[in-house]
Image (cartoon, rainbow, N blue to C red):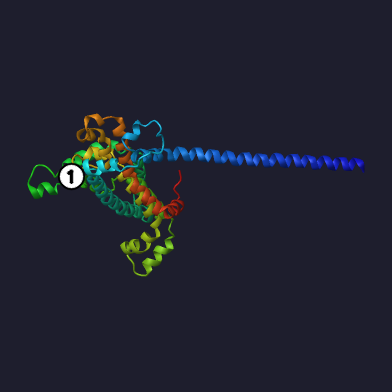
Amino acid sequence: MEKQAVTGTRRESGSADISAAYYLGKIAGFWLRWFFLVCVLFIILYPIIYMTGMAFRSYTDFYDVTVVWITKTLTLENADILLNHMGFGSAMLHTLIITVSAAACQLVVTSTVGYGFGRFRFRGNRVLFALVVFTVMVPPQMLNLSNYILMRDFDFFGLIRAITGKGSGISMLDGPLSFVIPALFGQGLRAGLSILIFRQIYASIPKEIEEAALVDGCGSAHTYLRIMVPSASNAFLITGIFSVVWYWTDYYSAAAFLSSFRTMTMDIAGLRTAASVILPIAEQNAYRFIPLEQAACLLMILPLLLVFLLIQRFFTNSIDKTGLVG
């Protein structure tokens, strides 16, 4: 009996030690996970925190060594200089025109092409789709030279030369058409990825739905507009958001095709040169340029942040349903 009592006591003490170590490990793991998440969150939010603090910081606060994160004097002077003296408002309007027109055209064209690849079987279907997927891997910088030459002397199958009687086409440079025309022909920014998404969505829709519509007398176009488009609403949301972001933040193509029709990315790239024209010589230094640059960046990303906050729930659900990862 005494041996059994001693054995039971040892087992109870051992289980108590194991339980204590187990709970200590769980507590340590909990705090380590939180520490890791806070570090990652800081890395992600640091640019926005820095940008916001600099955008509202006054010129005099830069000379105050006690000001590190939060400025003592909130000011809208930087935004006022950008919008009223440097023409940043017109650049925002130009960017909006290009983004809305090109993204809308790209959305319509890529959804139609994706529907053709996803629902119709024809000779060369796989080869053509493989070429579309290949365009996803081709950097857009490699196509800008040929697109520039095409937009500089645009002639649709020689019709413009035949109508005007001139030896050259029409220049589509320095305007929204230099982005809209490639989007209309499926050559917009990362259009191959949009076609791939639509193709996968349309291919996953049961054929019975389409067959039922055909039995009811719907043609291919009517079936696409009334049945397929509503069924692919998630793909429209995802590709629409991606297209807007790509066109809104594009610099390389804008710098190649545009000159006087300036966008926000072009103005930000040449901000210091433009600021040197309107600022006094005494203020032409980093203490003035940095707040202006950060204010311009904040004005550029603010519309995208607002759009994302408004449609965050729908965006997350659409990402899950379209199967996009990474």
Q: Which residue occupies the extreme left position in the image?
A: 165
Count the numbered circles shown.
Answer: 1
| Position of the N terminus by quadrant | top right
Residue 99 percent location from the top left of the image: 28, 48
Residue visible at 20% across and 36% down? 278
Depth check, front residue: 44 or 250: 44
Whether residue 207 is visible: yes
* As drawn, 3 above or below 123: above
Mark 1 lies on a secondary structure that is loop
Q: Quadrant of residue 311?
A: bottom left
Q: Quadrant of residue 139?
A: top left
Depth check, front residue: 18 or 193: 18
Q: Which residue is mark 1?
A: 172
Crowd around label 1: few <14 · some 14–19 · many ≥20 (10 Å): many
Residue visible at 16% across and 41% down? 153
Depth check, front residue: 236 or 128: 236
Q: Which residue occupies the extreme right position in the image?
A: 1
* As drawn, 245 above or below 209: above
- Name the amino acid type tagged 1: Met
Residue 285 percent location from the top left of the image: 28, 29
| Position of the C terminus by quadrant | top left
Q: Quadrant of residue 212?
A: bottom left
Residue visible at 45% across and 54% down? 317
Looking at the image, residue 256 sits to the left or right of residue 5; the answer is: left
Looking at the image, residue 8 sits to the left or right of residue 298; the answer is: right
Residue 304 percent location from the top left of the image: 35, 48
Depth check, front residue: 229 or 25: 25
Q: Which residue occupies the extreme bottom position in the image?
A: 216
Whether residue 239 is visible: no
Residue 98 percent location from the top left of the image: 25, 48
* As drawn, 103 above or below 288: below
